[in-house]
Image (spheres, coloured by chain):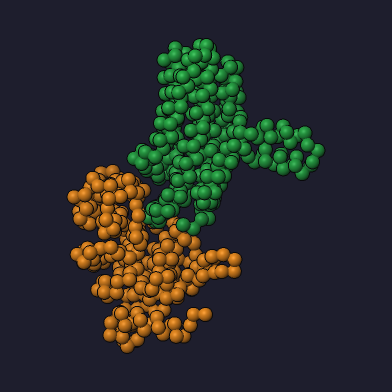
Chain colours: A green, B orange
Amino acid sequence: MKRAWIIAKNSLQEALRKKTLYILVVVALVVIGASRLFSFLSAEEEMKMIRDVSFSTIEFFGALIAIFGALGAISTELEKRTIYTLLSKPIGRREFILGKFIGQSMILLINYVLMCAFFIGLLLIKKSPPDIETLKTLILIYMELLMISSITLMVATFASDAFNLVFSFFLYIVGHLMSYGRQMMERTANVIVKGLSDMLYTLVPNYENFNIKDKVVVGVKVSWLYVVQTVGYGFIYLAIALFLAVYFFQKREV
Amino acid sequence: MAIIETKDLTKVFVLGRNREVTALNKINLAVEEGEIFGILGPNGSGKTTCLKILLGILFASSGETYIMGKGPFDLTMKKEIGFLPENPYYYDYLTGPELLTFYGRLFEIPPATLRSRVEEMLRLVNLQDVRRLSLRHYSKGMLERIGLAASMLNNPKVLILDEPTTGLDPIGCKETRDLLVDLKKQGKTVLLSSHFLSEVERVCDRIGIFHRGVLLTVGKLDVLQQQYKASNLEELFVKTITEFDRQHPVA
């Protein structure tokens, strides 16, 4: 694990120096800041709007950072052939993949904390400090982003960047629509369609589980039990994705 | 016992439906400890493929490879070797010392030792004056030199160098040759692949000639020259390849 950590720090150093993902964070901060333009609404409605826009922005731009970060993590090493020298050193392919994931998680965390800090700062300016439900929302969003990152990294071990980009975004959208889609499929009498729907529901990560902002924004409380269960659900997907990433990369000729 | 060994090493690349290319065909190579062994061959002859399989970067279709008696995925073996790839690329946002420190940490070299070792390597390859320059501003020759430094950082027993003098000026080539001779005096084993016949002639104890995935001949240069009635390495190279092509015409 020590060598995985060295790879992770190298990835973080690369991201900090290349500054490519900062653009997304800057745009996110602008969007969050723009939610202040709803001052014509009542104070309560304005706060709801600020929270809603901010949560959505953090989640969406966080997903972009997770996908684009993980996308380049392995492909850059392959395209630039830095992987040849790296694999000639005493580092296993499993350590390399874990190190890349840890590095991406750290990059994601730094960007995520920046966006959250800006959002919380905005709340404090509006004299509406964040409550425990806000914390739960942000925890679940970050877990969702880690899942997205791990799945994108897994696909990167065997597929091209173009395929991975399309697949990751498709999965992001489908993952948020899974529950609605399943409800609709349950009305059909077609056994094959129902079976396919059940299979998809089992395989595709249900990102909507992590979306509690609609409840939190209107003041509904979410239990810690739900948060813990959902985080556990996320870790299962994350573990499977990383296991598969290691498996595929060990089979891959570079 | 040979320190680098391949036994019936074969590599077949599958390019598509019903299309295969045999990059290596039952290669039996044995490099003795303490020698400088040069592998020559035209482009696409299988030299780099052979080196990559030795290092576990590519997988053999069949056959075995060993370095110091260990397989290509053995991490204890990798602690004792150094590798310089062909046309090396490195993390362009790092400086020379940062790159060497990164690799040094992978070798688990203690921090104080690593610091002095990095300085020593930078001086050896004459890059100590550009320590603050990031690698994206390095010339091709500078990249070769930092690559050479990275390959020797862990004081390896075995060095595998793929085209080590590509991009180097005549002074750089001479310095690399002198370095290789010095490494041999230290008892290290060097397996190098090169297109520069004059370089190979000057430093290698034995050579092997690859062509179309086959190891045509192996031995000491003077013995091979006598065997093939060649006056120099270039003539030997051309004769062995021409003879093989005559006996095995391309379909």
Residue, x 34% and y 68% (percent of image)? Answer: B193
- B29, above or below A76, in the image: below
Q: Is residue B172 left or right of residue A1?
A: left
In which quadrant will I find the N terminus of chain A?
top left
- Image quarter for residue A225? top right
Q: In this view of the protein, which residue sits in the foreground, A188 or A234?
A: A188
Q: Is there any visible trace of residue A148 in the rendered image? A: yes
Q: Is there any visible trace of residue B32 in the rendered image? A: no
Residue, x 23% and y 47% (percent of image)? Answer: B131
- A79, above or below A33, in the image: below
- A225, above or below A174, in the image: above
- Residue B86 appears at what percent x and percent y? 35, 62
Residue, x 49% and y 73% (percent of image)? Answer: B25
- Residue B76 appears at what percent x and percent y? 40, 55
Q: Is residue A222 left or right of residue B206?
A: right
- Residue A170 appears at what percent x and percent y? 58, 41
Residue furthest out toward the bottom: B229
Q: In this view of the protein, which residue sits in the foreground, B3 or A234?
A: A234
Q: Is residue A78 left or right of residue B220?
A: right
Residue, x 39% and y 63% (percent of image)? Answer: B68
Numbered disc total: 0
- Residue B189 appears at what percent x and percent y? 31, 66
